[in-house]
Amino acid sequence: MITTAIVLLALGGQHLPVNASFDYSGLPLLRTAEKVDVPFHTVTADIGGVKDGYVDVTTTTVYKNQTNSIVRATLIIPRRRYGDAQSGQPTFDIKATWNDAVLVLKPAADQGYKEVVGKTVKYASDLSTKVKLDPGATYALRVSYEVLLGRSGYEQKQRVTGYLFDGDKTIGQMNISYKYSDKSVFQLPEMHPNLGWQIGDKGAFVREVNYWPDNQLTYLSFYPGGF
């Protein structure tokens, strides 16, 4: 349950909440030298809507093969964690379908790294699979996962969750929404930066057209009920 909420946008992993410790995923990456567009990407993060203390995230990414030949590509789905030196790699389960066909995800070839960001350590154990796109065809990638609400702030009394936008393709239309309980928000959240967020007592939403995902991390932090 939420008492106050703040959604922030940080660039390149900077300006994280103090003492941040949380798991998150982000925009899937389609690695190919061929011409494949991303017309659409939408994200919904439901905080406590399914299970108290957890965040359920669902995403849909649409890809279109603009070539006249078959494109074979490597799909990378980020699996990340901010924590301390003892936190270890993230292991939360991610489910994905490609035009409704279940994908078998395995550890990515370059997964398993960690990076120190100030006093915080960033971990990565990304998942990967191979996909095929027929000439001129459009495909929908659907991803879902559940993570614990993270902690941040002084003595880690705040809760936090986030979603990463990083990639090498412009997104025709990007939508992201954070959902939370209207009964537990004492005041409307403050949104940063000014991306035209729509803010209400049940959630926060933004839509961007021709959006370039330049290593941007969205995250929402709040004090839990009873604080």
Image (cartoon, grey):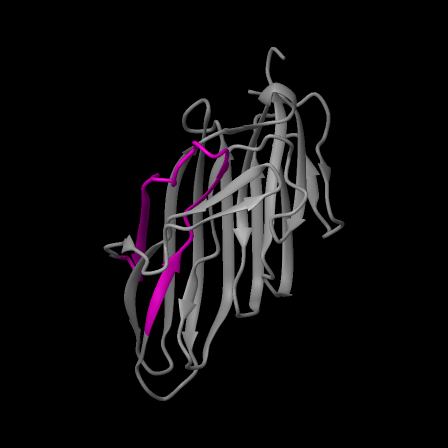
In the figure, residue 162 lies in which quadrant? Answer: top right
Residue 197 pos. (x, y %): 70, 46
Does 175 appear above or below 67? above
In the figure, residue 134 lies in which quadrant? Answer: bottom left
Of all residues shown, which one is farthest toward the bottom? 68
Left or right placement of residue 89 versus residue 182 in this view: left
Does 134 appear above or below 59? below
Left or right placement of residue 125 versus residue 216 in this view: left
Residue 181 pos. (x, y %): 57, 26
Q: Residue at x 37, y 52 (%)?
A: 126
Residue 128 pos. (x, y %): 32, 58
Q: Residue at x 34, y 83 (%)?
A: 135
Of all residues shown, which one is farthest toward the top? 226
Q: Where is the C terminus found, in terms of image quarters?
A: top right
Does 191 appear above or below 77? above
Task: Count the marks.
Answer: 0
Task: Judge whether residue 127 is colored magenta.
Answer: no
Q: Is residue 183 visible?
A: no
Left or right placement of residue 57 versus residue 178 in this view: left
> What's the magenta region?
73-101
Task: Judge whether residue 96 is colored magenta.
Answer: yes
Q: Is residue 205 visible?
A: yes
Q: Residue at x 38, y 60 (%)?
A: 76
Residue 137 pos. (x, y %): 36, 77
Q: Where is the N terminus found, in terms of image quarters?
A: top right
In the figure, residue 153 lies in which quadrant? Answer: top right
